[in-house]
Image (cartoon, rainbow, N blue to C red):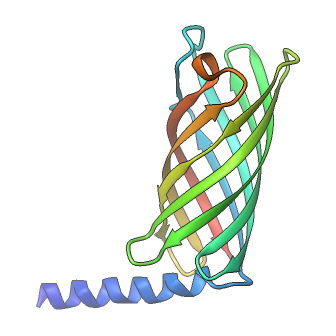
Amino acid sequence: MKKIIFGMLMAMCTLTASAQFEAGKSYINVSTTGMGLSYSKNEKARFNVAATGGYFLAQDWMAYGRVNYEHLYQIDNIGLGLGVRYYIEQNGLYLNFGALYEHLTTSVNNIYLTPEVGYTFFVNQYVTIEPALFYDLSINDFSDSSRIGARLGLGFFF
């Protein structure tokens, strides 16, 4: 009996989630990370806040734009990014690939390739909690500026 009820609940979650990934839907996400790891020996602490807005161009495919602010020890970074995301409806995972331009207050500019893998947990039909693992591959300074980390976001579908 427990297996049947659990199976029905999982089916209901899948049916409500699939409707959110249709073409023409919009998406907003706010996320934070303070768990960044880096190849740099100089990095002490990192805190990042990002806002992402997206639009579903086709079933399961979303194009997005991102704005982020990052505080790194005594340096502040502001970044702008673009990318695409693919949702795997069967299990809630998503694959993300984008590019990010970041300007540091020390007059340094950096460009990153930003692959990411995450999970979309639906709280209700419109609100999601989205943990993700990311890797920011620095094009300008691979050895000192590339970073990996975990991100936690709150998404809204409408």
> In this rendering, is residue 28 above or below 32?
below
Q: Is residue 111 left or right of residue 2?
A: right
Which residue appears at 59% of the width and 27% of the height? 146
Q: What residue is rendered at 67% in x and 15% in y?
A: 73
- Relative to residue 76, is residue 5 drawn left or right? left
Q: Quadrant of residue 3?
A: bottom left
Above-or-below relation of 80 to 5: above
User: Is residue 103 positioned above or below 86 on the image?
Assistant: above
Give the image quarter of residue 48.
top right
Q: Residue visible at 69% across and 84% down?
A: 23
Q: Position of residue 47 (x, y in %)?
A: 63, 30
Residue reaching furthest to the left:
1
Residue 10 x %, y %: 32, 83
- For residue 114, side relative to residue 17 (left or right): right
Which image quadrant: the C terminus?
bottom right
Give the x, y percent position of residue 147: 56, 29
The foreground one among 138 and 22 is 138
Task: Using the rendered image of the protein, determine whether residue 10 is visible from the camera's viewpoint.
Answer: yes
Q: Is residue 158 visible?
A: no
- Residue depicted at x 78% and y 23%: 76
